[in-house]
Image (spheres, helix red, strand yellow):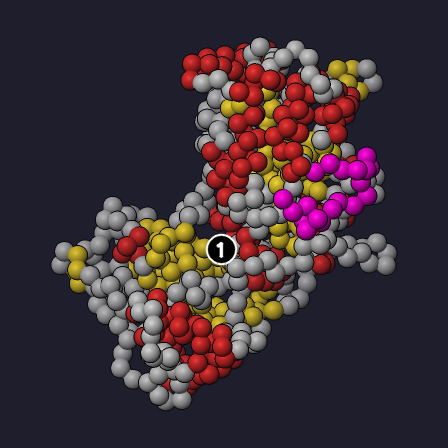
Amino acid sequence: MGSFSFSGCFVKGNFRAAEVAPPAEMEEMFEKYAEGGTHMTAEQLRRFLSEVQGHGGISLAEAEQVIEQVLQRWHHIAKFTRKTLTFDDFHHYLFSPDFNPPIGDQQVVQDMTSPLSHYFIYTGHNSYLTGNQLSSHSSDVPIIKSLKKGVRAIELDLWPNSSKNDVLVLHGRTLTTPVKLIKCLKAIKEFAFSASPYPVIVTLEDHLTTDLQAKVAQMITQIFGEMLYYSESKCLKELPSPEELKYRIIISTKPPKEKLESKRINGRKHKKRDSNGEDVSKKEQSNLTSNQADDHEKSEHNNHSDKYNETCNCKSYPFEAPAYKRIIAITSGKLTDKLKKELKFELEKVRRVSLSEDKFKKASVSYGTDVVRFTQKSILRIFPKQTRINSSNYNPITGWIHGAQMVAFNMQGHGKYLWLMQGMFRANAGCGYVKKPTFFMNVGPDGQVFNPKEKVPVKKTLKVKVYLGGGWHPDFNRTQFKFWSPPQFYTRIGIAGVSADKTMKKTKKRVVGSWRPVWDEEFAFPLTVPELALLRVEVCKYNMSEQDDFAGQTCLPVFQLRPGIRAVPLYDRKGEKFGSVRLLMRFELV
């Protein structure tokens, strides 16, 4: 068989990109299934897809449709007389993420009829911030971006304006500029279901007076209307399912009565706490928030008037405090230092509790199985510690292996932990809900639950072969790579998961005269808990004198990897998909 050459070769300076032959294994595959011929028929393609790619139920008609789509894509002919694939066509098909993605991303594949507590939920932290936690702007823009990416839990911090007659959203006691609550609520209503039909949970951290809580209740009920979910029971014993709650908005916050009572114990007043539960002074709060509010109010007044305020900015409201309590579908609270006692308290009553990453670490080390038992019915939300002022994130795996449903992340951040979060929620068609493994819900005869610390034997081994990569030329400009020098690409590949499965390996650096590197290397990853494993892939370009250049990354949920030879698209540091950069890989879970 003649050698295949990639299209799109180019010349930069004195460096000419050479033609690259496909892996020998690819040619052998084609020869085997084309039965030595130069063209592959629909029936031969059907056999290949069934035996190598794991598409067991594919019909001849579906194989014919694949051939037609491939020919139309690369030959741009609507009516094509040929009904077979050449080797070039075959390779184009395999190396296309649109036709041959690594995970099934077209439809929801998991059961969505279990209670909400049985799912990991794509959760944002301080969802309104555009940048860092101290001085960035509050806006509805990051909320919209998050919802478009499938995030299902949005956090809003509510504060009164300087006149105490309206509600603002901002990170309290910081220099972040505020945004009006009504603007955030309207953005949620418009974009809530742009990426997924499953429910959006709005978690409120409110620092409001009773009359402003009543105003919030009025805003929420008027804006969301029938989209708003009300719980019929004051004491839920089980949460509804994502399927039952399709296209609904769920409000979760601390009930008003609990909010007032939490400020005093045995008649003693406690210091006020911020959204992360840290003590702060009244003076610090009033000085910062009122100054921010005044500046924002002047700006808003100069630019436009809000029609909603014409009807809602009055001294008395038709809604009283009970109306605020009624809109709360999932009650929330914070655990005290008596973690073990509170984790076991009223397990039959469903609620949501929040822990900072530091407090969660303490709980997971000392009371790991109690945390798992708690998350079988109630929802645990973990949020970044206060010192992450640059909007960095923590390792989400630590929350997931304890069953925590809402691992809250700064979506405007970047780095490998955000890549893991994005990777987990690529599963299940990116709908924002991923079913927790069944072992989290199991209870033994003596009340035993899954123990995250227990060592278990290897269940499966993931075999990964990295063939080659391509697409850097159209996606990277001269300032990112030195296109006139011969590149040396290498791929880092490994597993993020429980500690026993965590590992990272890398291919050899390939010094080649092409921007389409060929590695043809295979790796094996033994997995003790494959249900929670994520495959990490990162490509780098070796740089002798400086730090190696980043050349793309992706994270993929192992439990949803499609077997066979797949085209794996890569993403930038923020998680945005590149237009062309991709790898050709093979997966086998044995």
Dot 1 amino acid type = Cys
Q: Looking at the image, which residue is at 40% across and 74% down?
A: 67
Q: Residue 180: horizontal and vertical position, in percent? A: 53, 23
Main secondary structure found in the magenta portion: loop
Q: Looking at the image, which residue is at 67% across and 58% down?
A: 111
| Magenta range | 229-247
In front of the other: 393 or 160: 160
Q: Residue 386: horizontal and vertical position, in percent? A: 56, 30
In front of the other: 302 or 201: 302
Q: Residue 170: horizontal and vertical position, in percent? A: 54, 24
Q: The C terminus appears in which quarter of the rendering?
A: bottom right
Q: Looking at the image, which residue is at 84% across and 54% down?
A: 447
Q: Is residue 56 magenta?
A: no
Secondary element type, mark 1: strand
Q: Is residue 410 visible?
A: no
Quadrant of the rendered structure where residue 381 is? top right
Quadrant of the rendered structure where residue 186 is? top right
Q: Looking at the image, which residue is at 56% across and 40% down?
A: 192
Q: Is residue 71 above or below residue 413?
A: below
Name the residue carrying label 1. 555
In front of the other: 375 or 504: 375
